[in-house]
C-alpha cells in the first residue's frame, strides 16, 4: 500500500474529509499538494500536521471551477514535481434550498464547483498520467447523490454526476492504466454535523445500521485503498462509506 514516489493533488484539502485524505496519502508516502481557495490558515494547519508526522506536502491555492486557474496550477505542479499520479476531487460546496425557491446562481455555483471542477481537474491531470501510463482519479461523491435529499437538488445532481463522470473516464483511460473511481460518504463527523442539535444527530444515527456516524478517517481509508496498487483492477466503481444507511 506504499505510495512512495507518487505525487497527489487533493482539492479542498485544507479541512474535513479533504484534510484526512491528505494525511492518509502523505502517511502512505505520497508528496501531497493541498488545494484550497479560502481559509489559508486551515491549509497551513494541514501542512504542519503532515510535516510534523514526517510527511511531504505543499499548499496550492486555486479555484477548481475556473478553467484557466486549473490548467495553470496543474501545469505548475507537473513542472515542479515531475508528475501528477493521484487526483482526489474532493472540493465541494452547498447552497441548499427547495427547488421552487432555489436561485439559478445557487444551482450554477454548486454544479460549477462540485462537478465542473472535477472535470477540469481530471482533464488537466490526465495528460501527465497518460504520458506515464499510470494514474488514479478518485471523486468524492455522496450518499445524497444516490438517495437524493429534499432541499439539496443541486448538490445531489452534482454528486450523482461525479459517478457518471468517473464511469466515462474509466472507459476512456483504461488503456493507459489509469483507474477512475468514486467514494461516496454517508453522514460523517465533521464541523457541520457537530453543529447539529442532539435530536437531529440521534435521528440520523437511528437510520444507520452500524449505529453511528462515520469519521473522516473512514473515508480517507477508502481513498487510500483506491490510490494504491491493491486496487489496480478496480475502475468505474463506487465505494460506499455510510455504515449501511444506503445499500
Image (cartoon, rainbow, N blue to C red):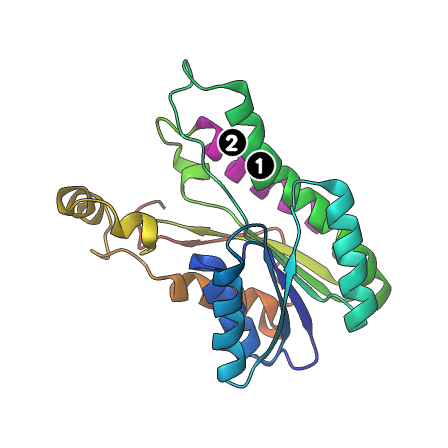
Which residue is outermost to the right? Answer: 131
Q: In the displayed structure, does residue 115 sit left or right of residue 205?
A: right
Question: On residue 135, which mark appears?
Answer: none
Give the residue furthest to the left. 199
Please determine whether, in this image, residue 150 is positioned above or below residue 246: above
Q: Position of residue 9 (x, y in %)?
A: 64, 62
Q: Which residue is mark 1?
A: 161
Which residue sits at x=33%, y=48%?
192
Cβ atoms at labels 1 and 2 below 8 Å apart: yes
Image label count: 2
> Is residue 167 visible to the viewer in this orientation of the structure?
no
Q: Main secondary structure of the magenta part?
A: helix
Q: CA distance from mark 1 to mark 2?
A: 6 Å
Which of the pair 123/233 is nearer the observer? 123
Q: Is residue 69 visible to us here? A: yes
Image location (x, y in percent) of residue 171:
72, 48
Q: Is residue 166 left or right of residue 191?
A: right
| Figure check: 65 above or below 157 | below
Residue drawn at the location 69% of the way across and 71% of the way down = 7
Residue range in magenta is: 153-170
> Does the magenta run of residues contain 167?
yes
Q: Residue 29, percent across and down?
A: 60, 81
**From the viewer's perspective, is 67 left or right of 159?**
right
Q: Which residue is mark 2?
A: 157
Where residue 114 appears, as percent x and y from the top left, is 56, 41
Query: Few, some or many C-alpha atoms within 10 Å of disc 1 (few <14, some 14-19, many ≥20)?
Result: some
Closer-to-camera residue (182/54) = 54
Q: Disc 2 on helix, strand or loop?
A: helix
Amino acid at each position: 500500500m506504499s505510495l512512495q514516489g507518487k505525487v497527489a493533488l487533493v482539492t479542498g484539502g485544507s479541512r474535513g474529509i479533504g484534510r484526512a485524505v491528505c494525511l492518509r496519502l502523505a502517511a502512505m508516502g505520497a508528496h501531497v499538494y493541498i488545494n484550497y481557495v479560502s481559509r489559508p490558515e486551515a491549509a497551513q494547519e494541514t501542512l504542519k500536521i503532515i510535516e510534523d508526522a514526517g510527511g511531504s506536502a505543499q499548499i496550492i491555492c486555486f479555484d477548481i471551477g475556473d478553467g484557466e486557474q486549473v490548467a495553470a496550477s496543474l501545469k505548475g505542479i507537473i513542472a515542479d514535481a515531475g508528475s501528477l499520479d493521484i487526483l482526489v476531487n474532493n472540493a465541494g460546496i452547498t447552497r441548499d434550498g427547495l427547488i421552487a425557491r432555489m436561485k439559478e446562481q445557487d444551482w450554477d455555483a454548486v454544479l460549477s464547483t462540485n462537478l465542473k471542477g472535477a472535470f477540469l481537474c481530471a482533464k488537466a491531470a490526465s495528460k501527465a498520467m497518460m504520458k506515464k501510463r499510470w494514474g488514479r482519479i478518485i471523486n468524492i461523491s455522496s450518499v445524497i447523490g444516490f438517495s437524493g435529499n429534499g432541499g439539496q437538488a443541486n448538490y445531489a445532481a452534482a454528486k450523482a454526476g461525479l459517478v457518471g463522470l468517473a464511469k466515462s473516464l474509466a472507459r476512456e483511460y483504461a488503456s493507459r492504466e489509469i483507474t477512475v473511481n468514486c467514494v461516496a460518504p454517508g453522514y460523517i463527523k465533521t464541523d457541520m454535523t457537530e453543529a447539529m442539535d442532539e435530536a437531529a444527530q440521534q435521528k440520523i444515527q437511528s437510520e444507520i445500521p452500524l449505529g453511528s456516524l462515520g469519521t473522516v478517517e473512514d473515508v480517507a481509508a477508502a481513498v487510500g485503498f483506491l490510490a494504491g496498487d491493491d486496487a489496480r483492477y478496480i475502475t468505474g466503481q463506487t465505494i460506499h462509506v455510510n455504515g449501511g444507511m444506503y445499500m
